Amino acid sequence: METVINIGYLVAAVLFILGIKGMTKPKTAVRGNQMSATGMLVAIIAALLDNNVVSYEYIIIGVLIGGTIGAFIAKKVAMTDMPELVAALNGIGGGASLLVASANYLESQKLAAMGQFVPTYDWSIAVILSILIGAVTLTGSFIAVGKLKGKIGDAKQVRLFKWIVKLSLAALLAGAAYFAAVDPVNSDLLIAGLIVLCLILGICLVMPIGGADMPVVVALLNSYSGLAGAAAGFVLGNNGLIITGSLVGASGIILTSIMCKAMNRSLTNVLFGGSMSESSGVSRSENDAFYEGKVKFSSADELAMLLDGAQNVVFVPGYGLAVAQAQHATRELASMLEKQGAKVKYAIHPVAGRMPGHMNVLLAEAEVPYDQLVEMDAINPEFSQTDVAIVLGANDVVNPAAAEDPNSPIFGMPILDVHHAKTVVVVKRGLSPGFAGIPNELFIRDNSLMVAGDAKKVLQDTISALKDL
């Protein structure tokens, strides 16, 4: 039976790897997701075959409760809130690892008292790592959820949080060393203290990080949840959990690296550099003065006239599109332009929105053809031949200062070169800065127009005006 179980875990691991590979491209993403889900089903069945570990009545209760909650969330959560959901699920995964390690520790006490368990150094380290990473992931993820929702602002006392982190780490190292080397099965108070300490550590690690860096933080916390799962696998001696957690941990780290590169930030700077908007030092009055009398405001009617003769049109989606739920209106306008003979594409920046792939998912929901979604490096050379580039709620990812102003805090950040288009139309509710906290020179360029308003309404008005031409 042990051989069958391990073969099941091996099959699950292969399906996970193929699933991750499939999710690297829009055309194969659905199949990749299905393969990963099948792999998880195989892993669960393999775990259930181990009668020495599993009590089926509790599994059934857990499936019913978890399935009900999952179905409710899937129906309730809007696509705009998907980043928050991913962050929350990361936290729940970390919390599960924390509880598994804690429960295994309590069980080991009973077995040790009966002489049936002798703790090893490896087991002690695995318990501590599972508690540490799981607790940090739990509280850190929910702080990230609060920042994504705008409920928690950027911390102003960054140094205070850094000192708390240093003190917590010092106490944690001392406690972990005592647990591992001296008394791993009779340390109830110590374990409780370490759990509380790790929960505080998770809060203090994420609080100083600015909202602009949340895509990186979500990716990193995703990696943490995988590492916590792998550590819990070592605690339980479960090969499937070790493999799955390692895959999630490794892929999360790779994604974090990609996000840092796309934002021109080092991981160290993200974690310990504080808020980008705070460091930029641009006040609201300075932001308003930058734009005063320089922005050329337009209307949906004028946008319709521009598009009426355009041959090459590129839509640049940002978080404003997600907030306005404008993906269907965007798709409708694009279809009208294609019927008139225009060539339409969508420029996708790696960190547009609040998490990697956010824009891809929203546009796929509106049945935008996959081949029209073009990544940054591929679309940038085409902007000089673009008649009209329509920026829908994007800000920092189209700011020319990243390429032209060495004094800008985002200088060197890869951006979409929309400023090279013949005409740029920015659809935005106002002139407030993006997460970087700085003005956007694109808005005052000679080839730029701004249509102020909700992206969905502006596009709907443009569609109506285009029909009347």
Image (cartoon, rainbow, N blue to C red):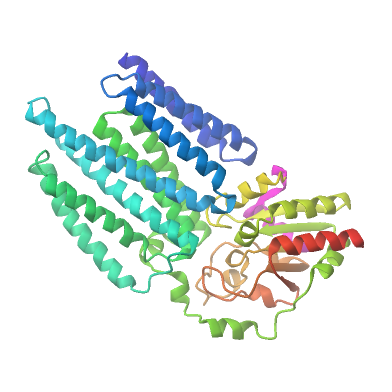
Give above or below for 429 relative to 41.
Answer: below
In the depicted view, which residue is nearer to us: 53 or 58?
Answer: 58
Residue 247 screen position, x and y as percent: 41, 37
The image quadrant of residue 464 is: bottom right
The image quadrant of residue 459 is: bottom right
> Is residue 427 a member of the stretch shown in magenta?
no
Give above or below for 208 relative to 347.
Answer: below
| Main secondary structure type of the part rendered in magenta | helix
For the question of whether residue 370 can be seen, the reply is yes
Residue drawn at the location 40% of the way across and 26% of the way down? 44
> Is residue 374 a member of the stretch shown in magenta?
yes
Residue drawn at the location 11% of the way across and 44% of the way down? 187
Left or right? Give the position of 110 relative to 68. left
Residue 369 screen position, x and y as percent: 72, 43
In the depicted view, which residue is nearer to us: 369 or 207?
Answer: 207
Residue 253 screen position, x and y as percent: 42, 47
In the depicted view, which residue is nearer to us: 149 or 244?
Answer: 149
**Boundaries of the magenta span:** 369-388
Quarter of the picture containing the N terminus is top left
For the question of whether residue 119 can be seen, the reply is no
Residue drawn at the location 54% of the way across and 81% of the way down? 284
Residue 393 screen position, x and y as percent: 64, 64
Quarter of the picture containing the C terminus is bottom right
Residue drawn at the location 61% of the way across and 47% of the way down? 361
- The mark total stands at 0
